Amino acid sequence: MAASGGSLCLLLIGHVLAVRMDKFLNNLSISEVMGDLYGPVVRVITAVSGILASVGTLAGQFLVMSKMLAMMLDLENTSATKTAAVIVIIYSAFGGARAVTLTDIFQLLVFSTLLPSLSLVIWNGFESTDEVVQVITKDPIFSLETIFSWDGESSYYWGLLLYYIIPGLRPPIFQRIIMASDTKQAKEAFAYAAALDFLMLLTVAWIATLLLATSGNLVPNKLVDHLIITYAYPGLRGFLVVGITALAMSTADSILNACSVLIVNDLIKPISPSFEVSVLAARTYAVVLGTLGLLLALLFEGNLLGLFLRSSSFYMPIVTVPLLMAIFGFKSSPRAALIGMLAGFLVVASWDSLFSHWGIQSLIPGMLANLVFLVGTHFLLGDDDVCI
């Protein structure tokens, strides 16, 4: 249920946000947009936040790839993580935007055939459908009472659903919007993406249900290993490993490409307008960012979801709120934007130490703090005249 918010988020980006972003399509990055709206300081803050968040997501892709490489090549986790990082860095440094597109296409082809094939293999292992029906009707995790309860665990996942739904507009996603020829094309692209994402999510959920019907004692963080060892015959096993690796590669090279734009366009160019971008410089940025992602992956090894949520805390409570407000026509002064960003950052930085017992992630409260202080400062300090 929580992950389904990601599909809805893509739909919202296409039908609600992208159609209002025609005035941003000539920009090169999200930081450039924020700089045009709120000045050079906000532009730099946006670039730094985007890079930090992206490096965190990049580290997560390294961890996903390392699991596959560890099983395929019989490597220990640390060695597999380092190998994954080297593969992605080299591919991204020498591939550029064309490599990003090709990997995305390959990922789509693999997963549109891999997931249905895997579900059929597991389904064929059942003697009758009664085993699956019994799990769906009898297991308490499928009951509405469990799903809509408000205990600590359920509230955590409801909060996660809200996190997935909110359009974070991270640099790679924003880059895909401004790559469109017009807002109509962007709207259609994200609508297709939302539909495909939801279909794949349903297939993954169905595979999980089938696994639960085979055995209720499976360890959650060992499910992928169990799938590959138990159900994937040699040909399908290699296909599965390559498919999941392609998924991580696709996201990772998109991140490195978007971050390179942020470094050049929003950190170096404003300071040194005469700076000429070279191929060597672009490759150097990819290596540096990839190395930072590797170090973070080694630090968060074994806590993939925690890594994604922590990386989002560097970005969404700081950048997403003023950007979304601007897309919907609300623009305040640089002073109000900076105060809102600071409020969001302070709430995120202090939340875990003060309110972790509530079971709520710091990301949503941080975004609310940014919104309250942005709008409050706008009206209390008399910035109404800059509203658009």
Image: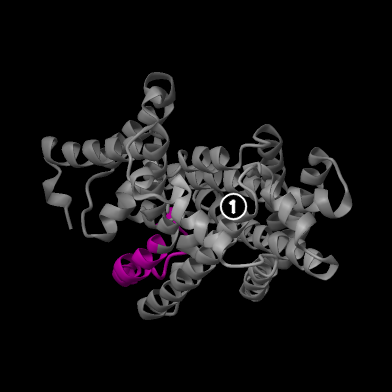
Residue 39 shows up from this direction: no
Please tell me which residue lies in front, 325 or 110.
110
Give the side of residue 329 with respect to residue 61, left or right.
left
Give yes or no for residue 23 being in the magenta stretch: yes
Indicate whether 159 appears above or below 281. above
Q: Is residue 343 magenta?
A: no
Could you tell me which residue is drawn at 81 percent across and 48 percent down? 70
Q: Position of residue 352 (x, y in %)?
A: 43, 25
Task: Choose top left, top right, bottom left or bottom right for residue 109.
Answer: bottom right
The answer to which image quadrant residue 122 occupies is bottom right
Q: Tell how many labels.
A: 1
Q: Is residue 229 above or below residue 55?
A: below
Query: What secondary structure predominates along the stretch shown in magenta?
Result: helix
Above or below, comparing residue 200 to residue 148 in the picture = below
Give the image location of residue 294, x and y in percent.
71, 42
Residue displayed at 58% across by 59% down: 131
Q: Residue furthest top?
A: 354
Decide if residue 25 is in sight here. yes
Amino acid under disc 1: Leu
User: What residue is shown at x 37% (from left), y 40% (from top)?
Assistant: 317
Residue range (magenta): 8-32
Q: Nearer the viewer, residue 68 or 86?
A: 68
User: Would you say 130 lies left or right of 5 here?
Assistant: right
Q: Which percent across, then down, holds residue 34? A: 37, 52
Give the residue displayed 69% in from the left and 52% down from the top.
Answer: 224
User: Residue 143 appears at what percent x and percent y?
Assistant: 39, 49
Relative side of 329 to 370, left or right: left
Q: Which residue corresponds to mark 1?
A: 212
